[in-house]
């Protein structure tokens, strides 16, 4: 199946940077071209990772602050792209306006909500999820991923699950240096540090 990664999260351009891609056509261009997006445009303009064949639409890495995204046009673009790809993964964060988040979550077959054990991020996550629920956002297909998990630092995954009222999909642990090495080299952790427990956890999550 042709697979597309759409990255509209902050920091801008992370997907193309980590995959070591020289992107000349990004997600903002695709939004502008929304109605004329077809297989020809995909094959000629979209960046493609040489190792995996993954297609990538990312933000330009020089975007400062909140990206200039029209939420309705982004949702419309994803509707068009679903006819061109067997699988689409969208990376987005809570910096987008609430109605855009609601539209994206409503469009997704599955949503993974990532947080960690810090009190700051867990509280922000609680208020964000409460706002989405009050806005009638469908959260029945949303599950929790606890990133950078550490034992004995408090806020265990089950505690976070109860706090956020979401089922736990995965708990990811790693040595921070391994992740940074992978990002800086533009190589997957499965290649750089294949014995890191993070790799096993990601395989289980994907399955």
Image (cartoon, rainbow, N blue to C red):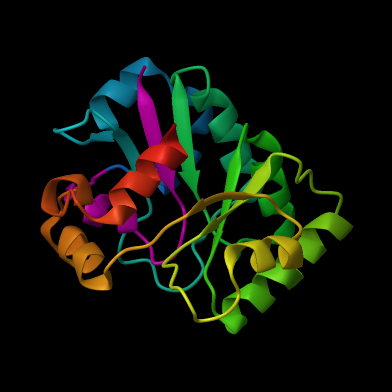
Percent coordinates x, y for residue 174 in the rendering: 31, 64
Q: Is residue 50 left or right of residue 17?
A: left
Note whether residue 26 is visible: no
Q: Using the image, determine if residue 193 lies above or below residue 107.
A: below
- The one nearer the camera, 53 or 171, is 171
Magenta segment range? 1-24
In the picture, which quadrant includes the C terminus? top left
Percent coordinates x, y for residue 55 in the rendering: 31, 32
Percent coordinates x, y for residue 190 in the rendering: 20, 45
Q: Is residue 77 left or right of residue 22?
A: right
Picture quadrant of residue 109? top right
- The one nearer the camera, 171 or 92, is 171
Q: Is residue 22 shown in magenta?
A: yes
Q: Using the image, determine if residue 144 lies above or below residue 49.
A: below
Farthest residue, direction front: 152
Percent coordinates x, y for residue 49 in the rendering: 20, 36
- The one nearer the camera, 14 or 117, is 117
Q: Is residue 107 left or right of residue 151?
A: right
Q: Using the image, determine if residue 148 lies above or below residue 28.
A: below
Q: Is residue 91 shown in magenta?
A: no
- At 24% from the left and 25% from the top, the residue drawn is 44
- At 14% from the left and 33% from the top, the residue drawn is 50
Q: Is residue 70 left or right of residue 174?
A: right
- At 74% from the left and 63% from the top, the residue drawn is 162
Total number of numbered discs in the rendering: 0
- At 58% from the left and 76% from the top, the residue drawn is 121
Note whether residue 207 is visible: yes
In the picture, which quadrant includes the N terminus? top left
């Amino acid at each position: 199946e042709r697979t597309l990664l759409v990255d509209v999260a902050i920091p801008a351009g992370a997907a193309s940077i980590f995959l070591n891609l020289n992107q000349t056509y990004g997600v903002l261009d695709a939004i502008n071209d929304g109605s004329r997006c077809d297989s020809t445009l995909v094959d000629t303009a979209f960046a493609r990772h040489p190792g995996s064949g993954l297609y990538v639409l990312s933000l330009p890495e020089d975007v400062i602050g909140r990206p200039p995204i029209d939420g309705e046009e982004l949702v419309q673009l994803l509707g068009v792209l679903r006819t061109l790809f067997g699988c689409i993964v969208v990376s987005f964060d809570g910096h987008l306006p609430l109605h855009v988040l609601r539209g994206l979550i409503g469009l997704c077959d599955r949503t993974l909500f990532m947080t960690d054990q810090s009190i700051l991020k867990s509280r922000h996550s609680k208020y964000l999820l409460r706002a989405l629920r009050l806005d009638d956002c469908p959260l029945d297909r949303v599950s929790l991923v606890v990133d950078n998990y550490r034992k004995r630092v408090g806020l265990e995954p089950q505690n976070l699950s109860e706090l956020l009222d979401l089922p736990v999909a995965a708990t990811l642990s790693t040595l921070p240096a391994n992740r940074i090495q992978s990002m800086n080299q533009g190589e997957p952790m499965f290649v750089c540090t294949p014995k890191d427990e993070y790799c096993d956890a990601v395989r289980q999550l994907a399955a």
